[in-house]
């Protein structure tokens, strides 16, 4: 019987009975890879998921701890409606202008006749400027184009141009939009440059061979391919501006009736604050920005299929 067992074994059976070392190494490497992203998940849980859950629960929690819709219904009051509408207008204008100006600058660098040496400094500056917001940005604009700013006084003294006579006011909706453009345009450049790089030269050459003009190429080939990216970036810029609070607060304080400042006034902890209303306003802002970010993610995925 032992002879039969010996003859029935194949060479690979004895080797296969031992634990495969390469498989153990792959498992250890996979575990280390997951270990590397643990800080990201912990950070997202503590500073994104849990605060969002707390806001949602607070928006529907009554004074006695039960479920209520009174706080959410309070969003329909004239003051809060006007604040959300003003925030939407500022976000739409800054997103639209940021997309147009940023696309023009990116196209000039990637597809235009500008020297290639311009691209690296532009992208470097865009990476820094897209994150430059809040109090430093507000003070920079006040010092430059405020009522007593360097540029304002320089234009008045050197050329006799009084910006206020032309309706310019930094502490207005148009001034807030102009301030937001400082970080909206660079963000647009950073997102659209890879999309422009993804336009293959063969597509343009094929269109020209078939008799298309440059305008027809852009209208029938390039623009339809870039449209999901453009719309998605517009949605992202909208969400980026809608949630900005530090810049507007430092620029003119509570004189701006926009949703982020109204939220800040409800949760700052003084006698005029209303935490329940603050939860409801924050919940409304999460809904608006969540829809905008969802649109961006969906459209971004569609555009990547063409630009890979």
Image (cartoon, rainbow, N blue to C red):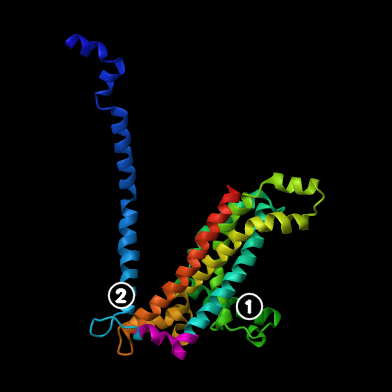
Whether residue 163 is in magenta: the answer is: no
Would you name the residue on which mark 2 appears? 57
Crowding near the residue tagged with mark 2, few <14, some 14–19, many ≥20 C-alpha atoms within 10 Å: some
In the rendered image, residue 16, in percent from the top left (x then y), is placed at 28, 23
**Residue 226 visible within the image:** yes
Relative depth, front residue between 22 and 113:
22
Q: Residue at x 30, y 86 (%)?
A: 270
Which one is nearer the viewer's eye here, 74 or 235? 74
Within 10 Å of disc 1 (Cα), the crowding (few <14, some 14-19, many 20+) is: some
Residue at disc 2, secondary structure: helix
Q: Position of residue 267 (x, y in %)?
A: 33, 81
Q: Say whether residue 72 is magenta.
A: yes
Q: Quadrant of residue 157?
A: bottom right
Q: Residue 9 or 243: which is nearer the viewer?
A: 9
Secondary structure character of the magenta stretch overall: helix
Task: Name the residue tied to disc 1.
Answer: 154
Residue 141: give x, y in percent of width and height. 53, 75
In the image, residue 112 sits, relative to residue 10, either above or below, namely: below
Q: Which residues are magenta?
A: 71-82
The reply to whether residue 176 is in sight is no
* Left or right of residue 264, residue 102 in this image: right
């Amino acid at each position: 019987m032992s002879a039969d067992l010996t003859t029935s074994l194949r060479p690979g059976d004895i080797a296969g009975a031992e634990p495969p070392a390469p498989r153990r190494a792959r498992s250890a490497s996979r575990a280390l890879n997951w270990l590397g992203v643990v800080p990201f998940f912990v950070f997202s849980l503590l500073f994104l998921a849990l605060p969002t859950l707390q806001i949602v629960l607070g928006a529907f929690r009554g004074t006695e701890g039960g479920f209520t819709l009174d706080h959410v219904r309070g969003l329909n009051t004239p003051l809060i409606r006007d604040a959300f509408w003003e925030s939407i207008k500022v976000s739409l204008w800054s997103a639209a202008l940021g997309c147009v100006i940023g696309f023009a600058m990116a196209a000039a660098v990637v597809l235009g006749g500008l020297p290639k040496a311009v691209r690296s400094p532009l992208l470097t500056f865009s990476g820094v400027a897209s994150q430059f917001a809040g109090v430093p940005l507000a003070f920079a604009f006040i010092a430059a184009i405020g009522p007593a700013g360097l540029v304002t006084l320089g234009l008045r003294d050197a050329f006799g141009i009084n910006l206020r006579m032309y309706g310019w006011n930094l502490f207005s909706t148009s001034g807030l939009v102009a301030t937001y453009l400082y970080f909206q345009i660079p963000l647009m450049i950073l997102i659209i440059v890879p999309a422009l790089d993804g336009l293959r030269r063969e597509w343009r050459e094929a269109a020209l061979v078939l008799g298309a003009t440059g305008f027809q190429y852009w209208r029938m080939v390039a623009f339809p391919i870039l449209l999901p990216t453009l719309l998605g970036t517009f949605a992202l810029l909208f969400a980026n501006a809608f949630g900005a609070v530090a810049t507007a607060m430092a620029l003119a304080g509570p004189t701006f009736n926009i949703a982020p400042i109204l939220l800040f006034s409800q949760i700052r902890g003084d006698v005029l604050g209303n935490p329940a209303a603050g939860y409801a306003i924050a919940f409304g802002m999460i809904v608006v920005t969540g829809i905008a970010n969802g649109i961006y993610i969906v459209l971004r995925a569609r555009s990547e299929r063409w630009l890979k």
